[in-house]
Amino acid sequence: MTDPLDQYINRREVPALKVHRMVLGADGMDLFPAGVADMDFKAPPAVLNALQKRLGHGVFGYETVPDGLMPALTGWLTTRHGWDVDAAHILRSPNILNTLAIAASIFTKAGDGVIVQPPVFFDFYDILEENNRSLLSNPLILKDGRYTIDFGGLAQLASDPKAKMIYLCNPHNPVGRVWTPAELIKLGDICACHDVLVVSDEIHGDITFEGHDYTPFSSLGPSYAQNVITCLSPAKSFNIAACCSAFTVITDDARRKAFQVENSRLTVNKNNAFASAAMTAAYSEGGTWLDDVLHYLAGNVALVRAQLATLSGVEMIEPEGTFLLWLDFRKLGFTPEELTEFLRSRACWAVTRGQAFGIGGEGFARLNIACTRAKLTSALQQLSAAINQID
């Protein structure tokens, strides 16, 4: 029986960002599109059915949050991750980037410092620059093919009076670490000691590989829950980024009230009928589909691992989570610009340049493996041919 995840779907039938000239460039429309972080898989059948049913109603006027959405979300968090969340602590937001920006705007002032841990999701930098916040870099440490947090450097930065907040990526994009409870506790203790608020982007929390369990920062205990703003969304887990919104979990009453006031001021309080239907179905009935996707992704990781083992000059940072692989091309000896050109013109790859993720990203590239095995196999063959032709 054919695996549904092996089905080829032409993303160009809709204006998908991953395959759009905005991303690929006018000269890159034939490249392997593996930069934008979404999947090439159809959404779960339950989501498709829910959207069809909602469409069939035919009336799309203003709506409130459906009664089943919050129980579906909290039930998912409890059963999937052992995290019991009070629905009263959850706010809606258009997307996680919106939450990150609002958190910076209301809990820090212009010129205040926000800590990030590069190489890390590039939109963190844009948000801080556009909100006139100071970037405080606490680069991750890469040793023996694995990244860890520089806790000494973190403590030093957090002790700076201008440091008010940290953007935590949990699991981490792009290096694929799923932070352990011990690591999160140590980070949390440093931040609490110096009154640094944790804003945790946990959008990839559902996507982890065997032996690596996602730990919601807020689940560490009451004191940790009081000092974190958690950002959640089903966008990555169920491949519904174009028809979903996000959730902000804030246990601290004063901070949650401040967020509610700001949401009201910005009129971030409307509901999309299709997003509500998609999210409710995903969290209620999408578990088996996600399990199948995780199994398929593990197979894709194994494929990349095996192929790179036959090549000289490219190494994979072993992923613990996310469908994004962090590949180390430094042994090829290219400059960052040369590497980008090599991957585009010789390997026909359109991936995300490592330098976009900040300090420590030079010589790396981020590869999205949430595609069919056939497409990934072809792309790896292209890479192999290109490397074997290097003089």
Image: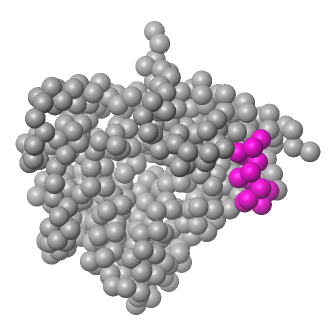
Q: Is residue 30 visible?
A: yes
Q: Residue at x 29, y 70 (%)?
A: 102
Q: Is residue 350 left or right of residue 17?
A: right
Image quarter (top left, top right, bottom left or bottom right) of the N terminus: top left
| The magenta stretch spans residue 306 | no
Image quarter (top left, top right, bottom left or bottom right) of the C terminus: top right
Can you give x and y, in whole percent of width and height, for residue 335 in the image? 77, 60
- Determine the image quadrant of residue 81: top left
Tell me how many marks there are.
0
147 w.r.t. 312: above or below: below
Q: Residue at x 75, y 43 (%)?
A: 345
246 w.r.t. 237: above or below: below
The residue at the far front in this view is 26
Can you give x and y, in whole percent of width and height, for residue 319 in the image? 55, 45
The residue at the far top in this view is 1
Q: Specify the principal SS of the magenta part.
A: helix
Magenta extent: 334-346
Q: Is residue 321 visible?
A: no
Q: How is the image coloured?
A: one colour
Can you give x and y, in whole percent of width and height, for residue 336 in the image? 72, 60
| The magenta stretch spans residue 340 | yes
Can you give x and y, in whole percent of width and height, for residue 272 in the image? 19, 46
283 w.r.t. 96: above or below: above
Tell which of 288 and 389 is nearer to you: 389
The residue at the far bottom in this view is 161
Tell which of 242 and 307 is nearer to you: 242
